[in-house]
Image (cartoon, grey):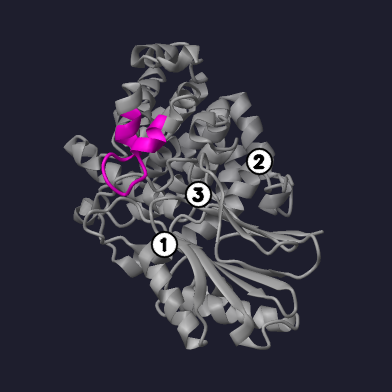
Amino acid sequence: MASINVSSEEILKSIKSVPALSPGAGQLLDVLGSGQYEISDIVKVIENDSALTVNVLKVVNSASMGMRREITSVHQAAAFLGDTKVIGIALASAGGDTFNADLAGYHGDRGMLGKHCLWVALAARELSRHTDGVVDKGVAFTAGLLHDIGKAVISDYMVELVPSIMEQAGKETEPDHLSAERNIMGTDHCEVGCQLARHWKMPESLITGIEFHHNPAGAPEEFRAMAYVIHLADTLAMMQGVGTGVDDMQYKFDVDYEKYLKLDANALEGLALDVQIDFNATAEALFGTDQETE
Amino acid sequence: MTVVTLGIGEYGVINKPGDIIKTHALGSCVAIVMLDPATRTVGMVHVALPESKVHLDRAKKLPGYFADTGIPALLEMMRGVGAAANLRKVIVKMTGGANVMDKNNTFNIGKRNVLAIKKGLWAERMGAVAEDVGGSISRTVTINMDDGKVIITSPGREPANI
């Protein structure tokens, strides 16, 4: 049990050694985070990065996307699939190792983080439509996709500490899983994610979505509506069973989202179902079909 | 041997030796399990929402998604394989229905699911003999045809059965 005394400094220091994003991926996040872009801007950035282009075309042409003919350009892919799907494919490939982390500290399986982030991204995009235009759908989608990247880093340090964290959290009373992470480890997946986002030089809108997705009321006013969008999308994902492991359902929920999002309970339920259907199709293309291992 | 894995809103039946039926990470959803000892048949439905009435189009495509349409859909499927002829002899169990930590209890789909299922079972003059519901734990359910045990697992926790 030599590594049980993890210091938060050690975790935050380790972020510095995470490889930088490719210039294309960095540029893509800048454009998306601005909320001011045309689909042609996205296409141009992806086309200028050969690795991103190859990955987008590979996924678009996979059998589960059901294309009748081969898609040979990013431009065509965007026309067939819509911009957010293409963004999702590009970002999932840019942060490949991150989204594919095994999440041992959360007792999650490989692939769970990517699926959870995709569900949250699709839900955030739909929820943004109910903010009177305050939250841009591309920013919401992108922030949703990135909100839990901190877990990919913190998970490895949590493996031996997770029993203590679980003992504190999960009683339907304080502390929740986030506070328990902080109590035991001196930091939490939101802070670590925020530091990683700064290391990757992400725009402030996306950093806010990562840092405040469990505490949207604390977000700077400019991005608070967006933080609530991610908070609600994340909660819906966990309720639908698309979470990341031991922490599923173990977070505080802030109902003040109602100040920023105009949709009633029925509309929210319908939205969750529509997102689930969209998710099933998209996840299969991005991550392949679930294989039974027994 | 078949392994039937149910996604959200799906329902299915097993009735051959060695068959397994399971559903992953219920969250606020509820799994209703129906065991018919007379025909050695196990059915399960993964319900996500209490009522179909404001989502009628969606309920047509995915009846298992809602408590009020999911129970009749599962019973129909069980009757289709010759089971559930006598509902008095069908054993019902349920699990799931977790909630996030919400002081005001305004977002309690888990609890509402459980209540709607009880109502739906009542309408068929049925009732659950065992349940493991609520709390803030996302549960996975597995039933093996050979012993009929309803095994509940969650990441990082000891398995339980009801």
Please give the name of the residue rendered at 64% of the width and 48% of the height, measured from the top-left corner: A284
- Subunit bearing disc 2: A
Give the mark nearest the N terminus, 2 or 1. 2
Q: Position of residue B92 (x, y in %)?
A: 56, 74
Q: Does B119 appear in magenta?
A: no
What SS does tag 3 mark?
A: loop
Where on the picture, by quarter, is residue B148? Answer: bottom right
Which quadrant of the structure image shows residue A287?
A: top right
Q: Nearer the viewer, mark 2 or mark 1?
A: 1
- Establish whether labels 2 and 3 are both on one chain: yes
**Tag 3 near tag 1, CB within 8 Å:** no
Q: How many marks?
A: 3
**Disc 1, SS:** helix
Q: Earlier in the sequence, mark 3 or mark 1?
A: 3
Q: Position of residue B114 (x, y in %)?
A: 42, 69
Residue at image point 55% right, 61% down: B162
B71 lies left or right of B117: right
Which residue is disc 1 drawn over? A271
Q: Earlier in the sequence, mark 2 or mark 3?
A: 2
Tell me whether marks 2 and 1 sit on the same chain: yes
User: Mark 2 or 3, which is nearer the eye?
Assistant: 3
Q: Residue shown at 66%/38% (left/top)?
A: A57
Q: Is residue B1 visible?
A: yes
Tell me which chain the residue with mark 3 is part of: A
Viewed as shown, does residue B61 lie left or right of A270?
right
x and y, in percent, of residue A215 in the image: 25, 39
Mark 3 highlights which residue?
Answer: A242
Disc number at residue A59? 2
